[in-house]
Image: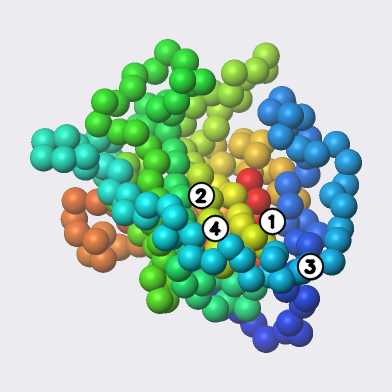
Amino acid sequence: MDTNFPPHPVPDRFDPFPQGIEPAVPIEGYPNTWTHTPAQPLIRRPVTRTEATGPLDLWRKLPCEESNLAVLGPGRIAQGQLMHMSGRILDEEGRPVRGAVVELWQANAAGRYYHPIDQRDAPLDPNFVGNGRVRTDEEGRYAFFTIKPGAYPVPVKDTWWRPPHVHFSVLGPSSLSRLVTQMYFPGDPMNEWDRILQSIPDAAARQRLIARQTHPAEVGDGWIAFTHDIVLRGRYATPEA
């Protein structure tokens, strides 16, 4: 993802996302959008100090030491392709967001989530739970060790498959810097078929959901490596997903 922000007039930091960045919902063939999407437009109200400045230091309330999802302990290594995932959390002007809480959750290498709702006939990995939480450093950086998730079918009448992807939740320094999004892998042909990814109208915004593969020398030859920056608001925001 290119996060070299070109000069432009700084927008109101509390404006809605620019047109084309938010998903076009409901998504055809994905019934969950009917239950997870408001039927009416959101009510706008003036931003107060509460929304603009708090809650502060959420990392003090939420454990943020769950960066290694792939190795639970000696001899307990998750099945699949070991992966290092890192990036930065940025604000609407490209500045690092320090102390943000970054949560990650994903399916295992067989494309199954460690969750009672997922009852698909695919194997569970006893050494992989698939979720973690970290806090960004002074440069807004986060990192996880995990495995590359598998694809899985969406259980609807006209079945379609979700490509490998990772879910992110970011809790920044205020309630206005909250973002739930997804990350996809470069070069996967199923990205073109994914109805969630393709629900983002703007092509450049869709591209901001796709990670960039980095050289393994950065993390060691035992892991494939990807980097993915997340922009919380503004013209170059990472889309919700």
**139 or 209, nearer to the observer:** 139
Q: Is residue 66 above or below residue 14?
A: above
Looking at the rendering, which quadrant does residue 193 occupy? top right
Say the numbered circle drawn on residue 171: 4
Identify the residue shown where x is 80% and y is 39%: 38
Say the numbered circle drawn on residue 203: 1
> In the rendered image, is residue 27 in sight?
no
Label 4, label 2: how far apart the Cα atoms are:
10 Å
Sequence order check, earlier mark of 3 and 2? 3
**233 or 171, nearer to the observer:** 171
Callout in the foreground (3, 1): 3
**129 or 81, nearer to the observer:** 129
Label 3, label 2: how far apart the Cα atoms are:
25 Å
Mark 4 touches mark 1? (CB < 8 Å)? no
Q: In the image, residue 49 lies at what x, y percent? A: 71, 71
Mark 1 touches mark 2? (CB < 8 Å)? no
Q: In the image, residue 104 lies at what x, y percent? A: 44, 47
The residue carrying pointer 2 sits among few (fewer than 14), some (14 to 19) or many (20 or more) residues within 10 Å by Cα, namely many
Mark 3 touches mark 2? (CB < 8 Å)? no
Which residue was labeled with disc 3? 47
